[in-house]
Amino acid sequence: MTVPVLPRLRARTLETPPQPDLFDLIPSDVDPRSVLSWVREGSGLVGWGRAASSAQAGTSTAGPDRFALAAQWWRDVVAGAEIEDELNLPGTGLVAFGSFAFAPESPDGGGLVVPRVVAGQHDGRAWVTSIEAIEDESVPSAPQATQAPEHSAGPTPGLTLRDGAVPAREWPSVIATAIERIEAGEVDKVVLARDVLAVSDRPIDTVTLLRRLAQRYAATWTFAVDGLVGATPEMLVRLQHGRVRSRVLAGTVRRDQSPAPSVTEPHPELEEPHTSDPRLHLVSSAKDLEEHAFAVRSVAEALTPHCASLDVPEEPFVLELPDVYHLATDLSGEAGDDATSLDLAAALHPSAAVCGTPSEVAARLISELERMDRGRYAGPVGWMGASGDGDWGIALRCGQLTAQSHAMRLFAGGGIVAASDPQAELAETEVKLAAMRHALGLGS
Ligand SMILES: C=C(O[C@H]1C=CC=C(C(=O)O)[C@@H]1O)C(=O)O
């Protein structure tokens, strides 16, 4: 293994006036793959450029140690850094964004990226952080509020969609095989995903994708790291000032135009499944509740050793997104050790929301049946600060830009249990692909 050269970094954070739109600050001439984002409802962080990266040339980031190597690299970088931070808020000072491959054997191991410039805002405060190597005399200029970069609007020109590893028409038979394997007792639950290729005759603009995602999917975390761009509704773990939070999703139904019921919380008293409203169908669907319970259990079991206390609600609630409803459970607790947010994400990955139960058998079935490398889809994506606090979501509803940014692999999957229906699972992947289709200007 090549030992990466450790950069010595200087980070300087200054308060700025709040921005109507953080994406307005990203210069139009930056490489689309270097754009970084973690934004929800107008708050969060964007970044661009590279001050340092844990995945330096010649260093393999793949393997089961990919999280531990990145975590150690970050501890060393922080120990050698000079940080000037007058705000001392989550997301100020030295910050790294990161994303990690779903599978240890993926050559796309992932890692941490420290941008040259980070702009953030939260609770009415806004800031810009400039980060440079200490040997480097050039100081990156702070972005101006009046900057108006020209990121193209409208559909991505000349865009066509092509089959991925498994064409849509073959997906139901893949699901049928998974159901047979579940019925044979091999696994209880497995999450299977497929990919679709979007090919363009011009580079795909990351900022345009982010704007569209943030506008339509405001309640999700709109992310970009190393060309992985998406809008995830699932928070794997947030660590902030000793508080640990996780939002677990599993169990999905397509949204329709029915009038809203007066109550969307679970109805234990319901005796018959309600078909008139998808939300009521979801909270009374034994199949979805089982799928959800596996996911909650896997997260609770992984967090428990790191928490002094952990609250696990007994019933899920319904999370409403523009295209789908999900069963959701928010866990919260007090940190019980000195694990960083990245250490917690590593302990939680892969949860049964993206892998299955039992995890190792499900992971083997995934690589056998999907016939593709997931890359960083379904892996942890997010950011962390110098203290180790940060946010890590699960990279869902996303696409991966190829090296020249002329194509993007889009991904969508779903949890399979014994009661799953192959055609319904195909429909579920189609509706989950709607977010990235919308981002690419293809309608949803
Ligand atoms: C695997 C995906 O979704 C997961 C998260 C929420 C709901 C899921 C489900 O209902 O199957 C999946 O577990 C995906 O969006 O690609």
Image (tube, rainbow, N blue to C red):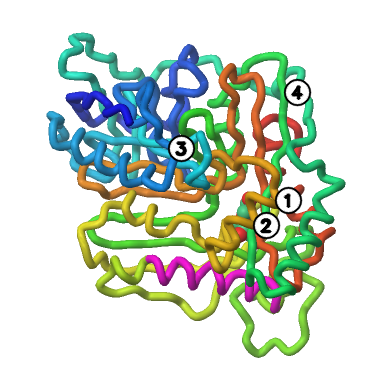
Q: Which of the numbered marks, if any, corresponds to residue 429? A: 1
Dot label at residue 159: 4
> Mark 4 belongs to which amino acid?
Leu
Query: Magenta segment range?
Result: 286-302
Q: Are marks 2 and 1 in contact (CB under 8 Å)?
A: yes
- Identified at 14% across, 37% down, the residue is 79
Q: Is residue 439 left or right of residue 359?
A: right
Q: Which of marks 3 and 2 precedes in the sequence?
A: 3
Say whether mark 2 is within 8 Å of ligand 1: yes
Check the picture and name the quadrant holding the N terminus: top left
Compared to 110, does 369 lie above or below?
below
Q: Mark 3 points at which residue?
A: 109
Residue 329: image location, x then y, percent: 50, 68
Determine the CA span between mark 3 and mark 4: 28 Å
| Foreground of the two, 369 or 30 | 369
Pair 2/4: label in front: 2
Q: Mark 2 points at which residue?
A: 414
Circle 2 or circle 3, nearest the eye: 3
Q: Position of residue 321 (x, y in %)?
A: 63, 54
Residue 379 to residue 37: above or below:
below
Magenta region includes residue 288? yes
